Image: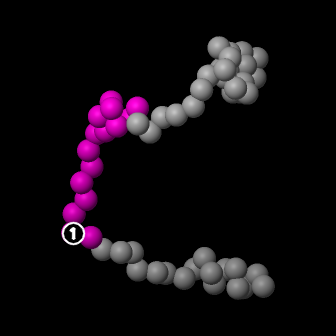
Amino acid sequence: MRQDVANMFNTNTPAPSFEAIRISIASPEKIRSWSSGEIKKPETINYRTFKPERDG
C-alpha cells in the first residue's frame, strides 16, 4: 500500500498548455456583487483570542 501511495504522487502528468492568459483588476461593482451576508453583532473578532466571533 505504501508503494501505491508513493506511485500516485510520483506520476508526472503533462501540464495543459495555453497560448495566453489575461489578468485584470475587478471593479468595485464586481467585488460588491461577490459579497453577501448579514452582520448581526458589531463584535467581529475576539480581542483575546483574535478568532472570529459567531454572527459578527
User: Residue 22 lies in what quarter of the image?
Assistant: bottom left
Asked whether, in this view, residue 47 is left or right of residue 38, the answer is right
Which of 5/25 is in front?
25
User: Residue 14 lies in what quarter of the image?
Assistant: bottom left
Q: Locate the N terminus and report the quarter of the image it occupies.
A: bottom right
The secondary structure that most of the magenta stretch takes on is: loop
Q: Which residue is mark 1?
A: 19
Q: What is the span of residues highlighted in magenta in the rendered image?
A: 18-32
Residue 50 position in % (x across, y down): 70, 23
Give above or below for 29 relative to 5.
Answer: above
Asked whether, in this view, residue 11 is left or right of residue 40, the answer is left
Residue 49 position in % (x across, y down): 75, 23
Q: Locate the C terminus and report the quarter of the image it occupies.
A: top right
Q: Residue at x 68, y 17 (%)?
A: 41
Residue 2 visible in this rendered orientation of the protein: yes
Q: Residue at x 44, y 39 (%)?
A: 34
User: Residue 38 lies in what quarter of the image?
Assistant: top right
Residue 50 visible in this rendered orientation of the protein: no
Dot 1 falls on a residue whose secondary structure is loop
Which of 12/45 is in front?
45
What amino acid type should be assigned to the residue bearing mark 1? Glu
Q: Is residue 2 magenta?
A: no
Neighbours of disc 1 within 10 Å: few (<14), some (14-19), many (20+)? few
Which of 54/19 is in front?
54
Residue 35 position in % (x across, y down): 48, 34
